[in-house]
Image (spheres, rainbow, N blue to C red):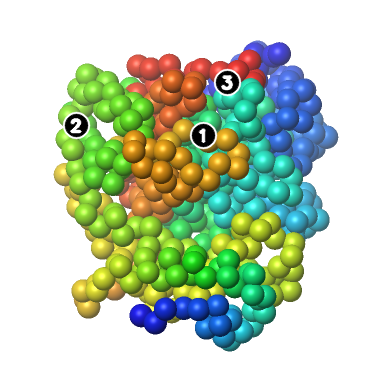
Amino acid sequence: MEKLTVDSLRTLARAQGLELDDTELASLLPLVEAGRNGIAAMGDIPPHVEPSSQFRQL
Amino acid sequence: MSDLCWTSMTDLAQMVAARKVSPVEIVQAHLGRISALDGQIKSYITVTGEAALASAKAAEAAVQSGAELGPLHGVPMGLKDLYCTKGVKTTGGSKILADWAPDEDATVVTRLAAAGAISLGKLNMHEFAYGPEGLNPHYGTPWNPWDATVHRICGGSSSGSGASVAAGICPGALGSDTGGSIRLPSALCGLTGIKPTYGRVSRAGVLPLAWSMDHVGPMCRSAADCALMLAAMAGYDPRDSTTSVLPVPDYAAALTGQVKGLRIGLLRAFFLDSAGAQQRAAVEAAAKALEGQGATVEMVDLDMVKLAPAASHAVLAPEAYAYHEQWLKTRAAEYGADVRERLRVGAFVTGAEYLKGQRLRSLLKAEVDAALAKLDVLMAPSTAIDAPPVGQTEVRIGSETVPVRASLIRFTRPFNLTGHPAASTPCGFTTDGLPMGMQIIGRPFDEATVLRVADAYQRITDWHTRRPPLAA
């Protein structure tokens, strides 16, 4: 996975309509990185596994 | 100080029905205690004293007239300030909603009122329920009543609910739980709280943090009181499509005090193995105590649970961002710094990552279901640590230094992902005199067994009856 930078995070934020200054982006960067790394570390989930749905018809 | 403020909800309801005490006396006693203590404890954002007294007078008149009484008739309670209350400010602990008064009640508020409960007001919380410490920069951070000298966190996000019930300021309260926000403050404040099965209790009219992980439930001073409140709240609600039509059992009748033959799984890897030494010892001692009552106990390991933090992030962060997106673009400065930053992180989780988290949930849920196919309940510490001082961000567990936030939610959030019912009950005190909690996790929609185990444990211990020094 490509490593994020403040500039790439700014681009992603703007695409979402979020205008963040350099200080805010620098503060967010390690949190976003940690989240992405954690999700990546989940590894491959078997293809037959569907998303959980708590929405019950019981 | 009135003993009425330390009387259980169960006993208060019986005393009112038997005309031994008036609802007006009960409400006045609690309002007096709010005046005396809440300047320091900061458990309430809004006290609805006049309305509570008016309701108490009506409740008294109903008793005098011989009317049929609900199971909570004349009993006060508090509402975490994310439950919508018609005409009464519902802030979510935020500045953004500081002046918002909804035009209808949350379903559970309506149901508790129909059962006769009287709201004393709206309770403090971590802003928009997004934090396990229970901090609040707008209304002040509630003070944990178990330390009169050091300002310690109550645990969150239902910190005001924890502080108020622990301090005898109200006998029971509603919390909400997306990663542990009922169980954490219950553990750190010495209370009993239950996060019911997802779908057991309506979320209609409750400000969301993450729709698919939010649960609502009671926080009280005993399992019996939780049973009383939960029975009044639970059941299908057409306003919440995720609620179940399964019938609500008689929770109070399930509290037999018996655990003989019950099969308990003690969660080892990830849970006991990474808890503080005192928390681990307390839960192991509790398991022994239940074994002494005839239960069988075996160690259990859940392999998938180590991935729960990442899955929780993948699901919770974008759901929270989705709810707050417009305010983050137009009123960002009005959020507290910690919550604003946490919410913004959710903007950077992709759709594929979100679904990966949801798929991991399927595996985790299947693993917990498999464990509970052979066992009646699982047990684990509620938290790895006791209540740290406000502002402390790291803590020592054994030889490791770990973040406070992660240590608080590590053991609770897996069951927000799986939706299983999970309670926290007091199981001892640290050498610093701070409460510790034990989680009891049950099969989907089997809150009755979870509460039965908690109640049976409370019948052979007195942890839940102790009073904090600040509120003595």
Q: Chain of mark 3?
A: B
Q: Which comes sooner in the sequence, label 1 or label 3?
A: 1
Q: Are marks 2 and 1 on the same chain?
A: yes
Q: Is residue A21 above or below residue B207?
A: below
Is A45 displayed left or right of B416 in the figure?
left
Q: Nearer the viewer, mark 1 or mark 3?
A: 1
Which of the 4 image quadrants contains residue B303? bottom left
Which of these two is toward me, B289 or B61?
A: B289
Which amino acid type is shown beneath numbered disc 2? Val
Q: Residue at x 76, y 42 (%)?
A: B46
Subunit under mark 2:
B
Residue B387: which disc?
1
Q: Could you tell whether B285 is left or right of B310 in the image? A: left
Question: Which residue in the structure is indicated by mark 2?
Answer: B297
Residue displayed at 24% across by 23% down:
B288
Q: Position of residue B235 (x, y in %)?
A: 47, 50
Residue B98: where, in percent of width, then height? 78, 55
Q: Is residue B379 above or below residue B291?
A: below
Crowding at mark 1 (Cα within 10 Å: few <14, some 14-19, many 20+): many
Please report, as a chain letter, where disc 1 is located: B
- Tell me the distance, in whole angstroms, between the alpha carbons under discs 2 and 3: 32 Å
Picture quarter with the N terminus of chain B: top right
Instruction: Give the number of the mark in front: 2 or 1.
Output: 1
Position in image of residue B373 (x %, y %):
19, 48
Q: Residues within 10 Å of mark 2 (few under 14, many from 20)?
A: many
Residue type highlighted by circle 1: Ala
Which residue is label 3 attached to?
Answer: B468
Relative to A51, B340 lies left or right = right
Q: Nearer the viewer, residue A10 or B157?
A: A10
